[in-house]
Image (cartoon, coloured by chain):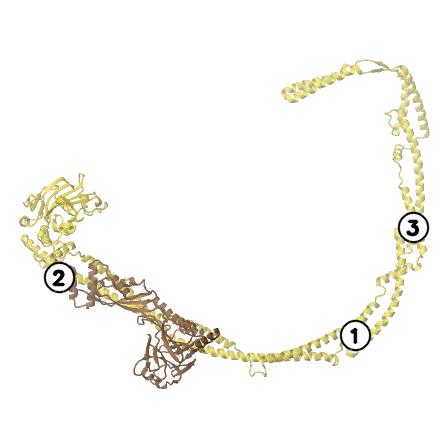
Chain colours: A yellow, B brown
Amino acid sequence: MKLISCYVENFGCISKKDYLFDGNLTSINEENGFGKSTLASFIKAMFYGLDAYRSNYSKEEKLPERLHYYPFNGGSFGGNLTFEFNEKTYKIERFFGEKSDTLDTLRVYVNGEETFEFGEDVGKAVFGVDKESFERIAFIGSDEITIKSTSSINLKLNEFLQGTQDDVSLDVALSKLDATAKEYKKSRQSRDKITLEQEKISELTAKIVNARAVKSALGEKLSSLNELKNAISSISNEIEAAQKTNEQITAYEHYEELLSIASASNEKAQEVCKKYNGKLPLEEEITALSNAIIKERELTVSLSSGLSDGEKIELENLQKTFAGGVPTEEQLVAVENKVNELSSLQATKSLVESEKPSDAMLKLSAKFSSGLPKPEVVNSADGKVEEYKKLKAEVESTGGGVIYTNKKPPLSHYLPFAIICALILIVGIALIFVNAVIGAIVTAVGFLSILVVAFIYLNAKTSGAYYGKTQAYNASCERASIIESELRNLLNSFGYTTSDGVLLAYSTFKRDLSDYIALLKIERERVEKLSKLTASINSLNDALINYFNGFNINQNNLLGSIASLKSKVSSFNLLNAKLEGVKAKKQRLNAEISAVRETISAFDKKYGTADVNAVLADVNAYKTELKNACELDERAKAYKAEKKITVRPSGAITDISNLNSTLIKMQEDYALLSSQIEADEYAVERLDGYVSDKAVAEENLARYKKNYQLLTATIAFLQKAEQNLKDRYVKPVKDEFLKYSALIEQTLGEKVTMTKNFEITFERNGKERSEKHLSAGIKSICALCFRLALIKNMYRDKAPFLILDDPFVFLDEPHFEKVKSVIAELSKEMQIIYFTCHDSRKIK
Amino acid sequence: MYLILCYINNTIRRSVLKIIHTADIHLGSKIGGFPKEISEERREEVRNSFKRMVVFAEQNDVSAIIISGDLFDSDRPFRKDKDFFYSVVKSHPSITFFYLRGNHDEAGEELNFDNLKLFGSEWNSYTLNGVTITGVELSSENSTSYYSTLNLDKSNLNIVMLHGAVADGEGAGIINLSRLKDKNIDYLALGHYHTFTENKIDGRGIAVYSGCLEGRGFDETGDKGFVLLTVESDKISHEFIPFSERKIVWDKVSVTGLSDAYSIYSRAKEIRKFSLSDIYRVELIGELDAGLDGVSADVKKYLSDDVKFIDVKDSTKKKIDVKKYENDTSIIGEFVREVYKSIDYSEEDKARIIAYGLKALSNVEVE
C-alpha cells in the first residue's frame, strides 16, 4: 500500500494543488497556514469521506470536518488521490456537499477504469478498519494523541493473529445475551420473567392453601348439610303429623258444632210451638183470622165513611141559612126575573147616559157660553141689518162713485229697491277682488235684483189703476159704516169675525142661534128620562139586595147572587138526601162487623192471640228453625262421612307455629349452607387448576432460572473467549511497542503493561501509572511506537502509510534525533508522510 | 304376511338384550396438562360424554347400563356432579343403572330410584330379562373372601361387576382372575384401568375393562368409549364402541438429521393425520443440533392450526460437533472450546450454552 499523488481541487485553504508522494518518506516542511493538517485530513477524507453534520452542533464540540474544510474560496469541494494497493494503481475521486453527504460523489478507478470493488467504504476495504481505528493506526497529530484500541482494531488484529475473517461482533452478541438474560432476571427487583413467575407461584400457592382449607372444611359442611337435611325431614314429618291431628280435631269440632247448631234450631222451633199451647194454628185458621181482620178493617173504614166533615159543616151552615125556609122553585124564578129586569133597566140607563151632546152642540155651547142674546138684541140687530142692506144698495146704484184713471206709480216707490240692488251689485263687484266666486255670485244677485225691480216697475206702469169717490156716496158710506160697526161689535161679542163682510157674519150668527136653541131642548128631554130610570133601578136593586141578604148572600153582582142562592138550595137538598143514605148504611155495616169480630174473638180465645202477623212470624220461624235443624243434621252426617269421623280424636290441637318457625329457620340455614357449599365446591373445583397452574409455573420458573443461568454462563464463556483472544494478540503488540520504544526511550520505566484495549501502564517509583502521566514528548513517542506496533501486527508486510502531522514538537533534541533515525529506518519498510513547520523538526 | 313378519321381528327384538358396560367416568375429575380453558372444556366434555352415552342407550334399545366403579373422581363428589348423575338416572326410567362404587366413590347420600341398583360389600344380584347381574364393592375386609363367597347359578347368564386391578396374588383392590375360574361368569365387567382390555377367565367367561369414556390427559391416549353387550340366544357378545368426544394422541417424532422447524413439522405431519377435534402431543426424539434449541416452539406454532390443542415436547439430545471447532481460531472456536473445557456443566447444559452463544454471535435473537 502506497500513496502516489493527490490533487486537491478545493479543500480548506488548499485549492487546485497537486502533491506527489515520491519515495517512502515524504517530508513536507512548511510554515503554519500552509495546509499541512488540511492535506493530512484530505488524504483521510479521500479514503473515509467526511461526516455529515448538524447545523446546530454544539459550540463546545470540535468543529465539524465538513465545515472546517469547506473551501475558503468556494468551488468544487474535494479532489482525488492516487495510490497503489495489491499491485494495482487506484484513484479515488471524491467531491463533497457543503453540509450533507447526500450530494457527495465517489468514484474509484483502477488502472484508469472505474471500479466498485471497494463499495462505498473504501477506507474499510483497504485498511480493514473503520475511520476511528484508521486515525489511531496511521495518523499521529500534535494536538491529540490517543493510545488505545478499538473493537475494529481488535478484530483486525485477531484476523491476522488467528487467520480468520468472521464478521462476528462480540459486543452485539454480548448485548443480545445480556438483554435476554435481563428478560429473565434483572439486577433490581423488577417485572422480569423469574420474578413474575415467582409471584405467580406465590399467588397460586396461596390459592391452593386456601382451596385446600376450603376442601378440608367441605366434608364437615356436607355432614352438617346432611344433618340439617335429616333434621328438616324429621321436623317436616313432625309438622305433617301435627297438622294431620289438628285437621282431624278441627274436623270433629266442626262436626260437633254443626250438630249443636241443629239442636239449637230445634229448640227454638219448640219454643215457638209452646206459645200456642203446643199446637200451632192451622194454616186455614190463620187464613180465616187474617181474612176476618181484613174484613173488619174494611167494614170499619166503610162505617166511618158517612158525611164528611166538610159536608157536615156545609149542611149545618145551610140549615142556618135556610132557617127561615128554603125558597121554592117558583120563588127562585121570580127573583131571577127581577134580577133580569134590573139588568135591563141598567142597560137602558147606560144607553141613555152614553148619548153625549153633538159636536155642533158643543161648539155652539162654547159660542154661547156667556148666555143666549136677549131677543130684543136680536130684533134690533135684525133691523140694523136691513138698514145696512139698503145703504149698500144705494151706494151701488150711484155707480159706486168710483172714477177710473191711468196714473204712473211714483218712481220713489221703487227707488229704495233700486238703490239696495245697486249697492248689492257694487258690493259684489268689490268682493270679486276679495273672493272671485262669492263676488261673482253677489254681483249676479245684485244684477238680477236690478233687473227684477226694473221689470216690476215697467210692468206696474202698464197695468196699475187708481180710484176716486163722490160726496153722496161718502154719506151713505158713513152710515153704513156705523151700522156695520155696531153689528160688528155684536158679532164680535159672540166670537164671530167680519172679515168676509158683516152681513155674512150676521147671517151665520142667526143660523147658529137657531140651532143652539133646538139642541138645548133635546138635552133637557134626555136628562129627564135618565132620572126616571135611575129611580127605578135603585128601587129594584134595593129590594133584591135585601132579599139576598136574607140568605147571607152579599154579592154586588145580583146575577151571581141568584146563582149562589140556587147552588145553596141545591147543595142543601143534596146533603139532606145523603145524610139519610148514610144512616141506613151504618145500620147494615154494624151488623156485619159484629159477625167478623166474633171470628177473631174465637181465634184469640183459642190461641191466646189474634195478632195474625205475630202468628205468621212464629209459624215461619218454627218452620225455618225446624228446616235449619234438619239441614244441619244432614250436613253433619255428610261431613262425618266425608271426614270419616268416628270418635273424637284424643289430644288437643297442637300449635305448630313454633315448629314451622324452626323449619323455616332450618330451611334458611340449609339454603345458606348449600350456597356456601356450592361456593366452596366451586373454589375446590379450581384447586386442581391451581395445582396444575402452579406445576406449570414451577416448571416455567425452573426453566427460566436454568435459561438465566445458562445465558449468564454463555456471557461469561464468551467474555473468557474474548479475553483469551486478546491475551493472544495484545502480547505481540506490546512486544513490538517495547521494541520500538526501546529504540527511542529508556525512561518509560519497568513493568510496562498493555491492557486488552492497548492502554499502556507503567510502573514508576513502585506505582502503576497510566500514559497520562507521561510528558507530551514521551507520549508522542509512545503514540508512534504504538502505531508502529499495531501496523506491524495488523498488516505485517502489507503495512499502510503513516501520516505524522508534526507530532514531535514537544520532543527534545536527543529524543527527536532518535525518532528521526527510527523513522528513517522505518521508511524503508513503509511509506511515511511527515508534516512539520519547524526546521528543527525536519527529518530529511 | 306383514303381520307375521312384524310378530317375528318383535319377538326377535324382545329376545335381544342390550347392556352397556362402562366404568371410570370420573365425573368432576381434574384434567391435567392442558391450559386452563382446555381443562375446563374437557371437564364439561367428560360430563357430556356420559350424557351422550345414556342417550345412545335410549336410542338403541339398551336396557341397562352397568357402571363398574369410579363414576365420580373424588371420594367426596361435588354436589353438581351427583345432581347431574341422579338427574340423568331419573330422567331415563326405561334404563336400569347398575352402579358399583369404586375406589374413588363413597357412599354418601343415596337416592332411591327404581332404576338405580346399587351394590354393597357383599355379593348382591339382580336379574334383568333372564340375565343375572352380580357385584360386590371390594374393600380390605372382603379382599380375600369375595372369591369364595361368589356363587353363581350355572344355568344363568351371569354378568359380574368388580372394580380393581387384575393381578396375581391377593390384596385390597386386587382381582386375581385365576381365582374366578369356573365361577360360571359369562362376562366380568371390570373398572379401574382406563384402557379397553380383555382377558379370558376360563372356557366360559371373559374379563373386560371398558376403559374410560374420555381421555383426561396425555397418560390416557387412544380410543376411549364403552362396551356394548348383546345378550342373544343365551350368549353374551361384546363390542368396544369408541365414543370419546375427542381423542388424545401422543406421537414420538424422530428429528435426527433434521435441521429446521419446518422439516420437523413436515415429518410430524407425515406420521399423523391431524384432526381439528383432537388433542395431540408431539414428542421430538433423536438428535438435534444445539443451534436448534427452542425449535419446539416453532413446530408448535406450525401445528396449532391443524388441531384442537397441541403440545410439542422436546426430548431430543442436543448435538454439538466439537471437532468442527477444534481448529477454529475465531471467537466462536475459542468460545466452544472454552465451554467444553468446563467441568461445571452437564453435557446438556453445555449444548444449550453453545446454542445460545452461537445464536448471539450469528446475530440471531436469543430466547
Please determine whether, in this image, residue A296 is positioned above or below residue A490: below
Identify the chain of the residue marked 3, using the numbered disc in the image.
A
Image quadrant occupied by the C terminus of chain B: bottom left
Q: Residues within 10 Å of mark 3 (few under 14, many from 20)?
A: many
Q: Please give left or right for residue A742 compared with residue A623 in the image.
A: left
Whether residue A560 is visible here, answered yes or no, is yes
The residue tagged 3 is A339
Q: Residue at x 45, y 75 (%)?
A: B9
Whether residue A768 is visible here, answered yes or no, is no
User: As rendered, which of B68 and A168 lies closer to the eye?
Assistant: B68
- Which one is in front in this view, the residue at disc 2 or the one at disc 1? 2
Q: Tag 1, which secondary structure?
A: helix
Amino acid at circle 3: Val
Identify the chain of the residue marked 1, using the numbered disc in the image.
A
Q: Residue A721's x, y, as percent?
A: 15, 61
The residue tagged 2 is B327
Identify the chain of the residue marked 2, using the numbered disc in the image.
B
- Which of the 4 image quarters holds residue A426? top right
Looking at the image, the residue that sits furthest to the bottom is B148
The residue tagged 1 is A288
Q: Tag 2, which secondary structure?
A: loop
User: As rendered, which of A49 and A652 lies closer to the eye?
Assistant: A49
Separation of marks 3 and 1 at Cα, in angstroms: 65 Å
- Which one is in front in this view, the residue at disc 2 or the one at disc 3? 2
Amino acid at circle 1: Ala
Q: Please give left or right for residue A163 compared with residue A462 in the image.
A: left
Q: Residues within 10 Å of mark 1 (few under 14, many from 20)?
A: some
Amino acid at circle 2: Asn
Counting every numbered tag in the picture gives 3
Q: Please give left or right for residue A169 compared with residue B251 in the image.
A: left
User: As rendered, which of A249 and B195 lies closer to the eye?
Assistant: B195
Are both tags, 3 and 1, on one chain?
yes
